[in-house]
Amino acid sequence: MKMKRSGIAITQWPETERPRERLLSRGASALSDAQLVAILLRVGRRQSSAVQVGMDVLQRLGGVRGLGQCGIEELCTIPGIGAAKAAQLKAAIELGKRALATPLTKGMRISSSRDLFDHFHSSMRDLKHEIFKVVLLDAKHAIVREVTVSEGSLTLSIVHPREVFALAVKESAAAVIFLHNHPSGDPTPSPEDHELTARLVSAGELLGIRVLDHVVMGDGRYVSFADCGWLNGNVSSMRREKESTRM
């Protein structure tokens, strides 16, 4: 595609070069990132086509990944991007994340830490702050609901056992799984993560609510406390927990 057409309205381009027509005839995979962004934007700015604005957005933010991580205010600082266009872009990114997530529904049984990673990774990987979630389970380890317990800064998420288990008691949960993300992309648990997990496991034991796992999400990777044998007296995995429920 000839990007030098940036000052000419896309409607004046040959049909084979127009992003929308190109998508309809050849499929979305035939378009560049800037062309896909241009379709969402629909129009450009004075002396710049929507494709050029799309290129500017991606260059400013560091590509599609950066577009997923930025906020509305940051998007609106780019010439040609107002609140409406920023909302369109963020809506498209969110739909993409939801499409990638494995459905996690009430009544579904968790069979492994990978199930949790497949569901939560796309929505948690690009967050610039930590969030801490709890998945509430019934006696058969089927999902009751998931809840975001806290949202913290880049380096710290404050979680109180009383908040976590108040939810579990209210929902009559028999077991829980914890999840949180590391904005750095490295899922290696910190000493604070280990300390917090130990506190939560102890609180759960007092209440008769089992902690089955604590999964730390990174960029394309995760660490499971249960898989590593760091829970309940070195229980090595959630499979051990499942076997105990059959007895």
Image (spheres, helix red, strand yellow):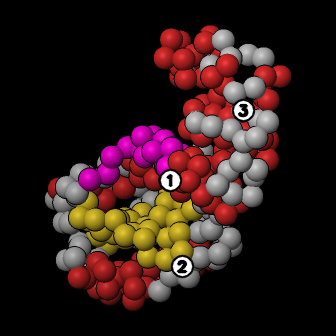
Counting labels gives 3
Helix, strand or loop under label 2: helix
Residue under numbered circle 2: 196
Q: Foreground residue, 61 or 72? A: 72
Q: Tell me which label, 1 or 2, sits earlier in the chain.
A: 1
Q: Which quarter of the figure has residue 135? A: bottom left
- Crowding at dot 3, Cα within 10 Å, few <14 / some 14-19 / many 20+, comes out as many
Q: Which quarter of the figure has residue 11? A: top right
Helix, strand or loop under label 3: loop
What's the CA distance linking mark 3 and mark 2? Answer: 52 Å
* Magenta range: 90-105
Q: Is residue 103 magenta?
A: yes
**In the image, what residue type sits under mark 3?**
Ser
Q: Tell me which label, 1 or 3, sits earlier in the chain.
A: 3
Q: Tell me which label, 3 or 2, sits earlier in the chain.
A: 3
**In the image, what residue type sits under mark 2?**
Leu
- Crowding at dot 2, Cα within 10 Å, few <14 / some 14-19 / many 20+, comes out as some
Q: Residue at x 47, y 86 (%)?
A: 160
Which residue is the extreme one toward the right? 4
